[in-house]
Image (cartoon, rainbow, N blue to C red):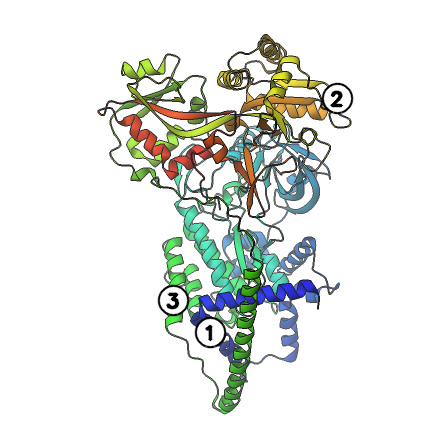
Amino acid sequence: MKLADLVNSVGSNFREAANFIRYPFQNLFRMGMRHAQEEYQKVEIPWGKKTQTQENSVEESNRPLEKRNSKAGRMPTPQELLDESNARRAQVKVANSSLSETANAVTIAAANRLSRKKFRSAETIPILPKDREIRGDRRGRYRVEGFLKDEERVRSYRGIQAVNNKPILIKEYLLPDGDFNQKEAKERKEKFEKLASLNLKNGAGQDFRLISPWDAIAPSNEKRCYLIFEPPIHNSLTLREYLLKNGAMTSQQVRGVLYQVLQTLWFLHSHRLRNFGDEVQQGVPHGNLSLDSLLIAIDSPPSALDEPQFFIYVADLALWEDLSKPPTAKVINHSPKQDLIDLGYVSFYLLSGTTVDPDTAQPLNPKMQQHWPDCKDVRLKQFIYRLLAIDQPFKTAFEAMQALLAPLQSQLEAPVEVGTEPDETEEDTQKSSVFRLLLIILLLGLLAGLLWQIIVRLLHASPKVELPIFNSSEPCCLAQIDRVPTGTVSYITEADGIWSYILNTMSLVSYNKTLAEELKIREPRLEDYTLNISKTNLIEAIRSRRADFALTTSIEDLPDDMEQVEVAYDGLVVFVAFSDNKRHQSIPNALNGKITLDQLREIYTTETLTNWSPPKGINNNIKLYMPVDNRQAVKLFEELVFKGEPPQELTNLAEKMMRDARPKINQKPIDESYILGEILKDFEQDQTVGIGFGLLSRVFNQCAVYPLAVGEKGQEVQPLVQQLDNQVKPIEPTTDLCDDKGSYWPDVEAFKSGRYPLVYRLVVVYPKDETRAAGKKFAELLKTDEGQRLLSEAGLVPLRTLPKRN
């Protein structure tokens, strides 16, 4: 036996033993039920017995794909799975005249898919070649690696992010001239671009396993649009591919699928979303549930006591899949009710292991009893009947989820009796004795393995490294703050300040809404609160009652009649072109991922850096960048880096940038967004060493640049951290900054303690007059967990560590 096998075996025994000790009665009951079910399934009766030919046909149809593959002994590739899926669908030849006969067997959408034909107008748009590059305005650049499949006006490609070679899925939506005129195509492209700001998460940042677009690209000069998706997890399959590979699911597995999908639908159907017409829509139907839009990812292999653990991801919402349908297509009003019916068909197919009858090549119909598999779980069958509206339908996904969970509890309380034939009683008794003996031996082995593991761990115990624990003494929600004034309230902030950007910029926290609007939606007591932008002295405005409170940066010499409360942090970051995190000969690596404050002063005074050599092939010249139109960023750089005494060279640099850039960009601001694009473009075209600075809130969660650690020599602090091997460590030049799964985040403690030298604090300033409590209560609202989450999503650093996103 190999050492790896021995370790895996011992680890598996340890997990099984731990699970058995935690839930002994449930595990014993489950093992007994499984044994009883196996014995029950061996009982045969002569009625309805199939011929040998039929049995062989069915057995061949239900056999896992890898056993039927001509290249036995290896795992089929995803392309082979897709080819097999297409071949199975091709067996279903449904003529137009017979569609009405099968309408009862499948939904209208499923029947349309069975009779789908490729539109000739789409064939005039060529397939994207390998290595074709697609430029996005929001996330970066993407490269086509290979073609996957061609559907009606939708094509799929394997791709990578050009900056870091991370795998992605590229979906191409065609808008051919034969289906869309110029105006219609323009309207569809505008809707595609809005998908880039789509927010399908709840207030706590959970997405409930919904696969949403990572980026949306609508080139003005092409007859197509692109959506970029991140794979949810490695080695995930669609449920159709899973059935082709593994055959039918067990009742328990189908219950697991149903629970997870119902949880997602419950969230979707209750989610508030601003639609393409800028109207708030209460509830979002999926509209496209099928075996192809649900993905399964196996989390752990099966063991003697446990079923395999898996997660179900939900993809291909009609919200964006319908955008490529021509205006002449029949309008389908998607509804939560239809989602439940579609889920009923999915669960029926999972139990059956296929969508078509292998004998007749006709679609399976759950309304026909002979099409149902031999299902011993009567409650599950009744549940699916209700999903399909064959029996009394469920009103909501939440009601269905509750009904799904209820039978499981009753099963634990009242074991099901399994009948046997009288002449098999003695044989079953002997088998039960053998089974009990094997069970005792197994339990003794597991206990021995458990004791051995405990002894080994005690002898070789290592210090435990814990991740930050979310432990908040603040209220969780906006609604928990009491006595919030509800009258007319006016509050102000600076015209060029970070608060103006955070509160007034669209889609930072929710699609097509500002943070100020989102606060009013979540907290109705703020309905009459009005934000004003002021160019006058904020303190004087509060004293003269032109404003009730102000949002600004921390004031060092605050007057005695005023109070200020910290609600968030922000900071300056110094960055260089990120290029490719896999390449060791990069600018971040050449700088060891850090820069000192003395080096910063030297660079922005002389435009040179001593005792440093650029990577091979990179120009020695250094090009500097400044967000000159972000006055607050420039002012903070002068105060924090040059201690309030900026040299004339810095002023000259700002003027030079404005002279050089203004003719090219007209009236667009020279801010962080502009210099991020310029610094990467100059590096790729001219191999220029570019160094710039900007506000963290404006550059976080992007791929164009790498933020350097900053500080005095030997005390440089990286503003961003990541999780590696159950430890929190600073990011490195090889860190994948394009990963949006919570792999890195601002170092809250470094900002809070001031260890990061370029930090500044954001506050609410209000009078100490107790009759003017609006400012104090507004600060309390922002300090709640919900308020901190909103500020974090807007780009600020929260006061404390927030729960990790799911």
Q: Nearer the viewer, mark 3 or mark 1?
A: 1
Q: Position of residue 297 (x, y in %)?
A: 57, 55
Query: Taking 781 as reference, is 176 left or right?
Result: right
Q: Closest to the observer: 586 or 672?
A: 586
Q: Position of residue 165 (x, y in %)?
A: 68, 39
The residue to which callout 3 is attached is 409
The residue to which callout 1 is attached is 28
Q: Is residue 94 visible?
A: no
Rendered image quadrant of residue 75: bottom right
N-terminal of the two: label 1 or label 2? Answer: 1
In what quadrant of the picture does the N terminus appear? bottom right
Mark 3 closeness class: few <14, some 14–19, many ≥20 residues within 10 Å? few
SS for tag 2?
Answer: loop
N-terminal of the two: label 3 or label 2? Answer: 3
The residue to which callout 2 is attached is 619
SS for tag 1?
Answer: helix
Query: Taking 666 as reference, is 471 left or right?
Result: left
Q: Position of residue 657 (x, y in %)?
A: 61, 13
Vertical comparison of 51 with 257: above or below: below
Q: Amino acid at mark 1?
A: Leu
Mark 1 closeness class: few <14, some 14–19, many ≥20 residues within 10 Å? some
SS for tag 3?
Answer: helix
Distance of label 1 from label 2 (alpha carbons)? 70 Å
Distance of label 3 from label 1 (alpha carbons)? 16 Å
Query: Taking 798 as reference, is 444 left or right?
Result: right
Vertical comparison of 313 with 30: above or below: above
Q: Position of residue 756 (x, y in %)?
A: 52, 29
Distance of label 3 from label 2 (alpha carbons)? 70 Å
Q: Amino acid at mark 2?
A: Asn
Q: Closest to the observer: 169 or 473?
A: 473
